Image (cartoon, rainbow, N blue to C red):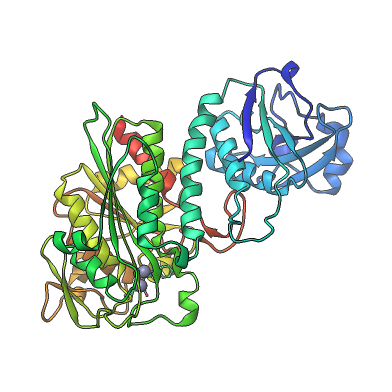
């Protein structure tokens, strides 16, 4: 990973290959920016390139008299926040081919944690998943200096912990399903942090415990399921946050099999579990004073000879029965167990995160996650955290009148609703497993995976949710 450090004064400047300088609206640079060239001298070039400093614009200029021989001007517009700064930094790093060292003053914009935002944007913007490339593209950029302003070392260090968690989540999502069996993911969860204790239920313990949803979904797979329970319990913490992540390492649909095109991205179906594992790693790494339990039911959803059949009934951990009429609606079956286990621990808040329904992606598109909750305060807490984190969520209703859609003729409920409102009926099913505990359900079928590369996001697993979950934990730590 790129080394990012802070330099207080211009006289500490080492030689570097290029300066990356913020430009605000109307071509203004930041007062006192030690790297900014005098833009008046570049008026002809800026006019020709129509560079005004609008957000998203970039322009390379030759600066032979400057600290670096070249300068990349980065437009930030007139409304800079942490997310736009992360995006600008990510976009900048993406356009820097062949430069080894960079000095930047992007962090001099006047917002909180600007150094952290710039560092995270640069790290994430330089992310690529190349484990399977026989000749990975070499990355030239090795060091970035944040030049001037208040010391941002603490912000950068904190950003590193969260970035590492996002990278862990992205790597897990991007890895082919063949190479991420439930037990392999469980092993990774075990190793995330020295101050997290992890219990992994194997297939026998899963049966014995009564995780009937997980058992049912796993029936068609040759690879045994795992239930991961991670606990971070710092001394002196008073509140407890439970996180539950959907961990389907591959979703073929089961006997209600998906069409081929629908399966292409289904290694992504464990993105919720990846976000939970990453978030627990970061929360423990940052040492927040809040208890956190991270739960990940892990299995693949396959079509082997023992696969569950449409019409089968399973009993979840809390004793409620579900008639499985469509084996492709499997996420809610494994989450039923995970949520019931979380509720039994009586935490102050449960958040689940899942690539649960195509309907969620249809309703809000690829960039926005659906938020459902049984509690207005809990919803507000998570909405505020997601805003601060720059991850877009939109609250949707848990409409009680739709509960009749999931009534079963023979069991407590069935696992599918009707044709319409699929993200809502899925949420209503989940609500049966949390009792009275304040709970927020995040359906991230859209944003868990990026369809294209832009700013600090690369096509593929996005690590969506990690930052929001970390921000909620921080808020609960007070
Ligand atoms: N993993 C899918 C949901 C999904 C679809 C995530 C597309 C990301 C992109 C989930 O298990 C599923 O197949 N859901 C079904 C539910 C239906 C059978 C009620 C769906 O959304 O079609
Ligand atoms: Zn499915
Ligand atoms: Zn699924």
* Residue at screen point 69% across, 41% down: 75
When the figure is inspected, residue 257 is found, relative to residue 362, above or below; the finding is below
**Rendered-image quadrant of the C terminus:** top left
Within the displayed image, which quadrant is ligand 2 positioned in? bottom left
Q: Position of residue 147 (x, y in %)?
A: 68, 25
Q: Position of residue 103 (x, y in %)?
A: 72, 31
* Residue at screen point 58% across, 36% down: 119
* Residue at screen point 37% across, 51% down: 187
Residue 266 lies left or right of residue 44; in this view the side is left
Tell me where residue 8 sits by quadrant: top right
Quick one: 253 or 40, which is closer to the camera?
A: 253
Residue 126 lies left or right of residue 214; in this view the side is right
Residue 118 lies left or right of residue 345; in this view the side is right
Is residue 463 visible in the rendered image? The answer is no
Q: Position of residue 323 (x, y in %)?
A: 18, 77
Quick one: 203 or 91, which is closer to the camera?
A: 203
Q: Position of residue 68 (x, y in %)?
A: 81, 30
Tell me where residue 53 sits by quadrant: top right
When the figure is inspected, residue 140 is found, relative to residue 272, above or below; the finding is above
**Rendered-image quadrant of the N terminus:** top right
The mark total stands at 0
Residue 10 lies left or right of residue 61; in this view the side is left
* Residue at screen point 76% across, 29% down: 36
Tell me where residue 399 sits by quadrant: bottom left
Quick one: 234 or 220, which is closer to the camera?
A: 220
Is residue 388 visible in the rendered image? The answer is yes
């Amino acid at each position: 990973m790129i080394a990012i450090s802070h330099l207080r004064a211009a006289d500490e400047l080492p030689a570097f290959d290029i300066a990356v300088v913020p430009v605000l609206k109307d071509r203004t640079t930041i007062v006192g920016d030690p790297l900014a060239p005098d833009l008046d001298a570049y008026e002809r070039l800026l006019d020709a390139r129509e560079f005004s400093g609008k957000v998203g614009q970039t322009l390379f200029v030759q600066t032979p008299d400057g600290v670096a021989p070249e300068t990349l001007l980065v437009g930030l517009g007139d409304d800079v926040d942490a997310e736009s700064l992360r995006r600008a930094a990510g976009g900048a790093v993406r356009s820097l081919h062949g430069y080894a060292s960079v000095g930047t003053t992007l962090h001099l914009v006047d917002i909180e944690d600007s150094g952290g935002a710039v560092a995270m944007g640069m790290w994430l913007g330089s992310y690529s998943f190349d484990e399977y490339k026989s000749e990975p593209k070499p990355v030239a950029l090795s060091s970035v200096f944040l030049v001037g302003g208040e010391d941002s070392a603490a912000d950068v260090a904190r950003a590193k912990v969260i970035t590492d968690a996002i990278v862990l989540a992205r790597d897990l999502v991007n890895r082919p399903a063949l190479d991420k069996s439930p037990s392999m993911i469980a092993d990774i969860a075990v190793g995330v942090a020295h101050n997290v204790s992890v219990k992994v239920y194997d297939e026998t313990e899963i049966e014995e415990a009564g995780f009937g949803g997980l058992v049912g979904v796993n029936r068609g797979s040759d690879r045994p399921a795992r239930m991961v329970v991670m606990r971070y319990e710092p001394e002196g913490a008073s509140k407890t946050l439970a996180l539950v992540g959907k961990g389907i390492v591959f979703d073929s649909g089961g006997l209600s099999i998906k069409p081929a095109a629908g399966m292409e991205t289904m290694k992504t179906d464990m993105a919720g579990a990846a976000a939970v594992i990453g978030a627990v790693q970061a929360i423990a790494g940052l040492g927040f004073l809040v208890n956190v339990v991270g739960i990940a039911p892990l299995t693949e959803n396959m079509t082997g000879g023992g696969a569950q059949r449409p019409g089968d009934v399973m009993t979840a951990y809390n004793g409620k029965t579900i008639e499985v009429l469509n084996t492709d609606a499997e996420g809610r079956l494994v989450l039923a167990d995970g949520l019931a286990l979380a509720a039994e621990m009586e935490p102050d808040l449960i958040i689940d995160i899942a690539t649960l329904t195509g309907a969620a992606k249809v309703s809000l598109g690829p960039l926005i996650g659906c938020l459902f909750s049984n509690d207005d305060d809990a919803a507000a807490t998570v909405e505020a955290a997601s805003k601060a984190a720059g991850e877009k969520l939109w609250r949707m209703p848990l409409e009680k009148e739709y509960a009749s859609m999931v009534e079963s003729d023979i069991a407590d409920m069935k696992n599918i609703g009707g044709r319409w409102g699929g993200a809502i009926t899925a949420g209503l099913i989940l609500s049966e497993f949390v009792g009275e505990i304040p709970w927020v359900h995040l359906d991230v079928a859209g944003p868990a995976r990026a369809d294209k590369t832009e700013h600090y996001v690369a096509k593929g697993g996005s690590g969506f949710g990690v930052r929001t979950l970390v921000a909620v934990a921080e808020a609960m730590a007070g």
